Amino acid sequence: MLKTKVMIIACPACGTRYAVPDSAVGAEGRTVRCAKCRHSWFQGPAEAAPIVLETVPTAEDVAPPVTPPPEAPVVEQAPRPRVYGDEELTPETGPSSFEHEPPFRPRRNWARLWTIAAVLFAVLALGATAALIRYGAGQWLPAVAANGFGAPQPNLALDFPANRQDRRTLPDGTQFFGVSGRVTNIGHDRQTLPNLLILLKDTHDRVVYSWEVVPPRRVLAPGESEDIIEAVTDIPRTALTADIGWKAA
């Protein structure tokens, strides 16, 4: 066993005692700090003979025990699968699965079925893409299916003139559409503004795109107005004009 000379020191602030090696303080003493209360003080050398403690060998000094490897599991050999031809079929065992008469059923060709399904899906996808390019999104597209305006608001006036609609193609080819207007409270009481709905239409007055607008302010006092300026990109090329109304609840 190893023998280590230690000394007992105590924190003057909280009284916590520590056993430290005599060599850690040294003959001249040194400044130490309490690990519990973080108080620092100068600790002089041991005045009395240091205490000798017998230390127990650590885990690093002792070789770890050797654990015998586990026994390999015993795997029972599965019986050999039965192969057609090992025994002769008799009338008692039933008809052969290789007979061309019922109850024999031919195997389904799953690869052929999946191929047919993929071809049908591709035809439908191409048809939908062609309709979108030729006629625009239209009302059949789920994104603009709910294209009706909500109930009118008698005390709220919408002013979105056509000359303040900006339809153009940006230099990078992106399709841009901007609208601006004003909402005014023409009533005698405070009014809460619902969300607005902007519908973009093509030359045949069909809805090809829509988006919802949240007003900057929800409540307007009598006579107050709120300017609305909105713009979107990546719209259909067929979108030419905009209709603005209240979004249905």
Image: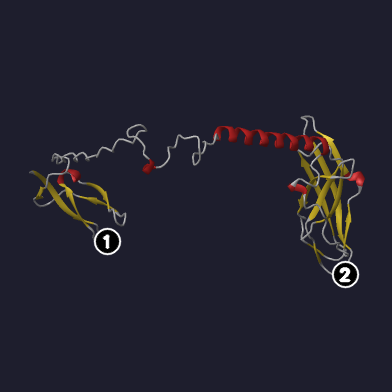
Q: Amino acid at mark 1?
A: Cys
Q: Which mark is residue 14?
A: 1
Q: Is residue 93 left or right of residue 235?
A: left
Mark with earlier residue (2, 1): 1
| Quadrant occupied by the C terminus | bottom right
Q: CA distance from mark 2 to mark 1?
A: 74 Å
Answer few, some or many: residues within 10 Å of disc 1's Cα (few below 14, many 20 plus, some between 14 and 19).
few
**The residue tagged with tag 1: helix, strand or loop?**
loop
Q: Where in the figure is residue 16, as x and y percent of width and height?
A: 23, 59
Q: Is residue 241 visible?
A: yes
The numbered mark at residue 188 is 2
**Where residue 202 sits: x, y (%)?**
87, 41
Which-is-in-front pick, marks 2 and 1?
A: 2
The answer to whether residue 28 is seen in the rendering is no
Q: Nearer the viewer, residue 234 or 109?
A: 109
Could you say whether the residue bearing mark 2 is in a helix, strand or loop? loop
Q: Quadrant of residue 223?
A: bottom right
Tell whether 248 sits left or right of 98: right
